[in-house]
Image (tube, rainbow, N blue to C red):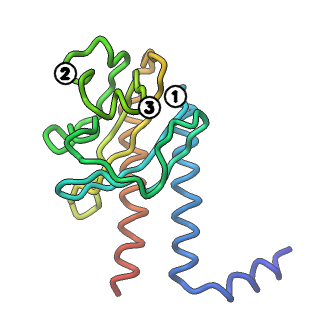
Amino acid sequence: MIPSVTAAHSLLSADERAAIAEIEATTSILQLVTRLTGMRFAGIAKFTDLEWIVCSVHDTFDMGIHVDDVLDLETTLCSEFCINPQTLFIPQISQNGRFAARPVVKQYAIESYAGAPIFLPDGRLFGALCALDSRAMLFDDPNLPETLSLFARLIGCIFYANLTATEQ
């Protein structure tokens, strides 16, 4: 089995290997996020000045958010990270006047949210790691904010490594 892996490895460019590694790593992280939060959707989104762009998803609920979807950043819950770059947990959005009226909440029937900002190692805000569900969730694990932040930091490092590799 090792020779075939080595042969396949030599047929792929460094960029292709990096892209595959990035996809595998982020997919695994998203699966872990859904397990830890009990939520059925986890995703990674990139921010531009005005847009929220979906990079990767793990969706056992078929929420309807897909890779390459683009939303106005200001309509999303993740936009909070542009103001306050701390983990955010909203166990029951319908009971929270600040977030319940956001268009994305109604569009995707979101009732609970957990998220962390993704920073690149050079300090730039890249986007967000978020988990969503149509069910209200209890976030009773006191380690969950730190764990979500660690995953977001890891994602930032993975993306940064691949960004700098393609820029060289």
Residue at point 73% right, 82% down? 8
Is the N terminus in the top left, top right, bottom left or bottom right quadrant? Answer: bottom right
The residue pinned by badge 2 equals 98
Residue 62 relative to residue 74: left or right: right
> Between disc 2 and disc 3, whose residue precedes?
2
Residue at point 42% right, 19% down? 139
Residues under labels 3 and 1: Cα distance? 6 Å
The residue pinned by badge 1 equals 39
Residues under labels 2 and 3: Cα distance? 17 Å
SS type, badge 3:
strand
SS type, badge 2:
helix
The residue pinned by badge 3 equals 132
SS type, badge 1:
loop
| Image position, residue 104 (x, y; %) | 32, 34
Residue 140 relative to residue 73: left or right: right
Instruction: Give the number of callouts.
Output: 3
Position of residue 117 relative to residue 131, above or below, is below
Residue at point 47% right, 27% down? 133
